[in-house]
Image: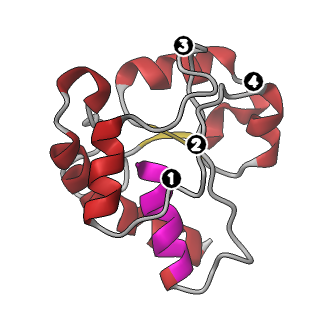
Amino acid sequence: MAEAMFYQLIKDHHLEDQVQVSSAATSNYEIGNRPHPGAKKILRKYHLDDRGHTARQITTEDYYDYDLIIGMDEQNLRDLRRRAPQECISKIHGINDLVPGKAGIEIPDPWYSHKFQDTYNDLAQALPYWLDYVQQN
């Protein structure tokens, strides 16, 4: 869901030729799977394209290929930092790190809670700050 939402923001600001958006899991549990039906329902509700997304696990190359690695929750951030090459750790950030008053606050994985609308709402608040960051850097 986060990938589709951020890609739409990038597209709305005509940055799709300059910014690459991708998502990857820290575990191999869902590799090859399509988005959860709850996520797909929210994407349809907001007319967002999942662009044929299938789950994949983050790779060492991703740490070098991307300027930002953004984790949604503390477990993801721990896993990302543990797997990261030392010189890439500074690229890892929490989703709310740029949101005033919300730095360090995670967005829970809706796979467990099934609160996909809450996740959408939280992402809708956080992602514009990342768009601003990308535009300024």
| Region rendered in magenta | 1-11
Element on which disc 1 rests: helix
Q: Which residue is mark 1?
A: 3
Name the residue that disc number 4 marks: 86
Report the amino acid beneath label 1: Glu
Residue at 60%, 34% (x, y): give it: 24
- Give the crowd class for mark 1: few <14, some 14-19, many >=20 residues within 10 Å: some
Please say if 124 is above or below 67: below
Q: Disc 1 to disc 4, how far (Cα)?
A: 25 Å
The amino acid type, in three-letter code, at marker 3 is Tyr
Q: Earlier in the sequence, mark 1 or mark 2?
A: 1
Magenta span includes 88: no
Q: Earlier in the sequence, mark 3 or mark 2?
A: 2
The main secondary structure of the magenta stretch is: helix
Callout in the foreground (1, 4): 1
User: Would you name the residue on which mark 3 appears?
Assistant: 29
Q: CA distance from mark 3 to mark 1?
A: 19 Å
Real-space Cα separation, disc 4 to disc 2, in angstroms: 21 Å
| Distance Cα–Cα, label 1 vs label 2 | 6 Å
Q: Quadrant of residue 119?
A: top left
Residue 23 - label: 2
Q: Is residue 96 visible?
A: no
Among numbered discs 3 and 1, the one appearing first in the sequence: 1
Residue drawn at (27%, 53%) of the image: 42
